[in-house]
Image (cartoon, rainbow, N blue to C red):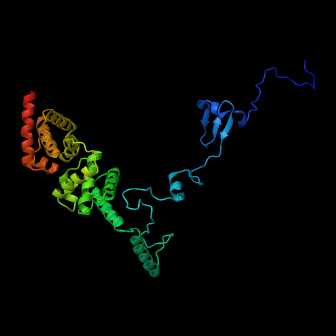
Amino acid sequence: MLGPNSQETNNTPQKPQSEETIDDINLDEVDPEDIIQTSDGEIIHEPTGLILEEDQIDHGPEWRAFNHSDQQAKSRVGAPTTKTLHDGGLTTTIDWKNQDASGRSLSSQKRNQMHRLRKWQDRIRTQDAGERNLQYALTEIDRMASALGIPDPVQEVAAVIYRGALSEDLIRGRSIEGVSTAVLYAACRQEGIPRSLEEVEEVARVDRKEIGRTYSYVSNELTLKMEPVDPKQYVPRFASHLNLSEQTQNKAKEVIDSSAEQGLLSGKSPTGIAAAALYTASLLCDEKRVQREIADAANVTEVTVRNRYQEQVEILELHE
């Protein structure tokens, strides 16, 4: 029995605590799998629990936010840099609203002052003729991309191509509008966004002949890798305009594949081939559309649809 002043002893052997320090560990012999990094940036040797490095720089903000609205309210940074602006979006932009930080309207004297500041801000954003050229060109690219419904990543690619053309002095002797349109068409080709020359011409300030000539020149000089346009890329968009079913779209793609196997795509307009394939598929799937409807949706002539249709019918008869 235990006396009143006696204490119960624990006979379980205790593991001696590690008294190693970082000086006792040879970092060259440490197994990399034993090194872990915590969420707060500490680097720890897991078997011993020693902190090998803790002087980490916290690149995050000094404030905390618990929801999106708090984050937006406390954030003091602007939009990310982008190639679609001539200065990368780094310069200051003065808001067009004549209001102060509290939302109150400015006095007439302050409005005149802000008007002068905006005017001088626009002037100092461009330092030379090259920057003014780039600013106007990127504005044109943005205008045409918005009209064609081209996504921002493709517009970014077009801006990069134009900057490359400007650095190689390919703009000399050519219009800014022509080169801007050509690089936007090239970006669509590179990123697999189906836009035909006819569609681009509708929103451009130059004609189709100049677009094609400038596109060929820029792509050759910059050695841009361009894959042949696949007519199947146009099928979903044209079918959407014509309210055709998924079955008809799949059939049109099969017709295009059969045409490709016979070598009928070479030298032909991809939009014309896609339009004719949709016309053929609509007949086979009992969703008939007249040639004029399909020609209008594809922005081609009825003669083109009719000629490509005759070629595809011959192929289908051979397969049968």
Q: Residue at x 23, y 50 (%)?
A: 195
**Eyeballing the image, is 91 above or below 225?**
below
Instruction: Choose top left, top right, bottom left or bottom right for residue 255.
Output: top left
The quarter of the picture where the N terminus appears is top right
Left or right of 16, for residue 75 = left
Left or right of 90, for residue 193 = left
The quarter of the picture where the C terminus appears is top left
Image position, residue 181 (x, y; %): 25, 57
In the foreground, 277 or 194: 194
Left or right of 144, for residue 266 = left
Image position, residue 61 (x, y; %): 57, 53
**Eyeballing the image, is 252 above or below 59?**
above
Q: Residue at x 46, y 72 (%)?
A: 99
In the foreground, 160 or 296: 160
Instruction: Choose top left, top right, bottom left or bottom right for residue 141.
Output: bottom left
Q: Residue furthest top?
A: 1
Image position, residue 288 (x, y; %): 11, 41
Left or right of 249, for residue 51 = right
Image position, residue 228 (x, y; %): 21, 42
Q: How many marks?
A: 0
In the foreground, 215 or 308: 215
Instruction: Choose top left, top right, bottom left or bottom right for residue 169.
Output: bottom left
**Eyeballing the image, is 265 above or below 79?**
above
Q: Residue at x 40, y 62 (%)?
A: 87
